[in-house]
Image (spheres, rainbow, N blue to C red):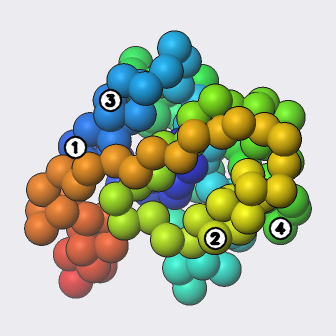
């Protein structure tokens, strides 16, 4: 299972999906709600959640794409789906502390894996977004 915004889907994201998929039988991508993106990043994503989900599905790499809910319990999806592995992006910092505390306090045996970066000087989403806005 992976989590993210995936606003401007790029080769770095696709590499992230491939890396995550190497660690399990099925890859589920949880796409952040527009309001959550606004809260975390200070602005709304360029593409709506449904558009971001459709773009990921279109790539044919992942097995399932699901929508994260706005403002609710961030751990609900993990409790419901009980993934064996959660793969985090190389630069993913939000939610990590909460996730680690949850895993330590639960009886779930979830392994956290950190993906390697893929040309971050080129494919860092925030850099791409800034270029588009200029």
Quadrant assignment for the N terminus: top right
Image point (68%, 31%), residue name: 83
Image point (83%, 67%), residue name: 71
Which of the two discs, 3 and 2, sits closer to the camera?
Answer: 2
Which of the two discs, 3 and 4, sits closer to the camera?
Answer: 3
Please provide percent x and percent y for residue 122: 12, 62
As measured in the structure, the alpha-carbon distance from the residue carrying label 3 to the one carrying label 1 is 10 Å
Please provide percent x and percent y for residue 108: 78, 38
Q: Which residue is mark 3?
A: 18
Q: Which mark is residue 97?
A: 2
Image point (68%, 59%), residue name: 99
As measured in the structure, the alpha-carbon distance from the residue carrying label 1 to the one carrying label 2 is 27 Å
Please provide percent x and percent y for residue 76: 85, 48
- Say which label, 3 or 1, has the lower sequence index: 1
**Viewer-nearest residue: 92 or 44:** 92
Image vertical order of residue 113 relative to residue 8, above or below = above
Does any portion of residue 14 appear in the rendered image? no
Circle 4 residues within 10 Å: few <14, some 14–19, many ≥20 = few
Q: Quadrant of residue 100?
A: bottom right
Circle 1 residues within 10 Å: few <14, some 14–19, many ≥20 = some
Q: In the figure, is residue 116 to the left or right of 38?
A: left
- Say which label, 4 or 2, has the lower sequence index: 4
């Amino acid at each position: 299972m992976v989590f993210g915004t995936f606003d401007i889907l790029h080769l770095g994201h696709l590499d992230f999906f491939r890396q995550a998929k190497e660690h399990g039988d099925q890859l589920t991508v949880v796409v952040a709600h527009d309001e959550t993106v606004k809260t975390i990043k200070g602005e709304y994503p360029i593409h709506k959640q449904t558009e971001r989900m459709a773009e990921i599905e279109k790539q044919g790499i992942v097995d399932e794409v699901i929508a994260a809910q706005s403002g609710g319990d961030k751990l609900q999806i993990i409790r419901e789906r009980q993934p064996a592995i959660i793969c985090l992006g190389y630069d993913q910092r939000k939610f990590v502390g909460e996730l680690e505390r949850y895993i330590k306090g639960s009886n779930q045996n979830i392994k956290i894996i950190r993906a390697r970066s893929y040309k971050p000087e080129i494919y860092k989403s925030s850099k791409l977004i800034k270029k588009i806005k200029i």
